[in-house]
Image (tube, grey):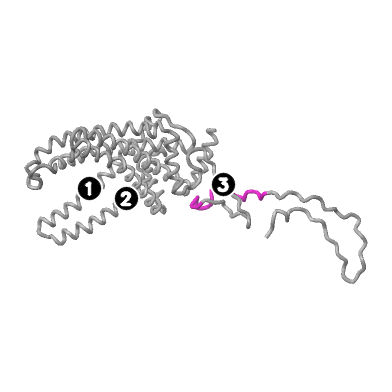
Amino acid sequence: MTSPHDDVPQPPTWAAPAGTGTPPPPEHVPQPGPAAPPQPPPPPSGWGQQPPGGYGSWGPAAPPPPGVAWRPQALQPGIIPLRPLGMGEIYDGAFRAVRANPRVMFGLAALVVTLAVTIQSIIQWYVTGLVAPQLSDLSSEVDPSGQMGFAEQLGSSAGLLISTPVTALATTILTGLLIVSVSRSVLGQVATVGEVLRSWRVWLVVGFTFLSGVAVLVVASVLTTGVVLLAVNDQIGPAVLLGLAGGFAFVVAAVWFSTRTLLVPPALMLEGKKFWPTVARAWRLTRGSFWRLFGIYLLTSILAGIIAQIIVFPATLIAQLVLRDPTATSFGSFVVIGIANVIASTLSTTFVSSVVALLYIDVRMRREGLDVELARAAESAA
């Protein structure tokens, strides 16, 4: 093993040859001078170049010399370091994205969510008042006194089901718009509200979400139809078996499909290519990263759900206890719960969208060396 001192010239040593006397002194013996200070080893050859097979793991193309632990610091022009990310860095980057551009990440998000929740609450309140009287006869057997508000709750559920597409559309649009802001924040840039709103490719995200929803609905309808037909024909055992096995398979397939298409929205927003080639490319990007994407997205969804319940649950209690509305179906209850839903949806949508955008960037840095391209773009913009 060598050390930095091995490269410093050493004075020659002299010894008498075997069987001879003392040799004459040399004409000139170099005198040892002060030792040169140790120099750090040069960067290993190939550093910063894409190794064969891509950036599956972060490191140089060739291993550094033995005993040398030298590694350059990753460039960080924005919210994340330009290298493959850990889960904690992804979550930290999601919060940094909000602080880097609060006008878009919180202001625009709150505006879109407020509009969607307002429309949803009006539809739900109207449908509740329209449907509840029609269900009074049906609910009389379960709730003869009407104190439980069974008819109102059924009407509210029907209204929520009818108005759900409104919030789903708004959330999809908002997710696409926020991805643009996060991608700019990675380079240390700030996207304005106007620039984000001009991102027409968000409609590609809406189209993909619609097609995915239709596909899931068709599969669920076929499964439900099969169970109903077996039950109508007195095939109770096969109907139960199909319902249990088919339901389990449906959930597994839905989770698998959702994970494999998780990177489609950011790819559609950021790559600027045609629809189907981009969808196919995003599908390929998830190959080999399924469990990592699934685990991080599942944890993110759980955290977002907890955050939402922390905000919505107290609002529901206020509507039931303070406003004395046990069923939480009055207009005042809809207002209180609607405000809570605006706050909860804004926070959860912003957080989840930021994580998805950073997962897309992380996968591309690992597989394609996107960190090199981003570093060049950051240096060019500096």
Graded by Cα atoms within 10 Å as few (under 14), some (14 to 19) or many (20 or more), the crowding at tag 3 reads: some
Vertical side of 166 occupied by 2: above or below: below
Residue, disc 3: 48
Work out whether residue 227 or residue 341 is closer to the camera in this orientation and state it. 341
Say if mark 2 contacts mark 1, CB within 8 Å: no
Q: Quadrant of the C terminus?
A: top right
| Label 2 – label 1 distance at C-alpha | 14 Å
| Label 3 – label 1 distance at C-alpha | 48 Å
Q: Is residue 373 left or right of residue 225?
A: right
Graded by Cα atoms within 10 Å as few (under 14), some (14 to 19) or many (20 or more), the crowding at tag 1 reads: few
- Give the mark nearer the N terminus: 3 vs 2: 3
Q: What amino acid is at disc 2?
A: Phe
Residue, disc 2: 257
Place of residue 65 in the rendered image (x, y in percent of width and height, measured from the top left): 63, 55
Place of residue 60 in the rendered image (x, y in percent of width and height, measured from the top left): 56, 51
Q: What amino acid is at disc 3?
A: Gly
Place of residue 43 in the rendered image (x, y in percent of width and height, measured from the top left): 63, 49
| Residue at the limit of the structure toward the top, as seen here | 194
| Label 3 – label 2 distance at C-alpha | 35 Å
Say if mark 3 contacts mark 1, CB within 8 Å: no
Residue range corresponding to the magenta coloring: 40-57
Secondary structure at numbered mark 1: helix
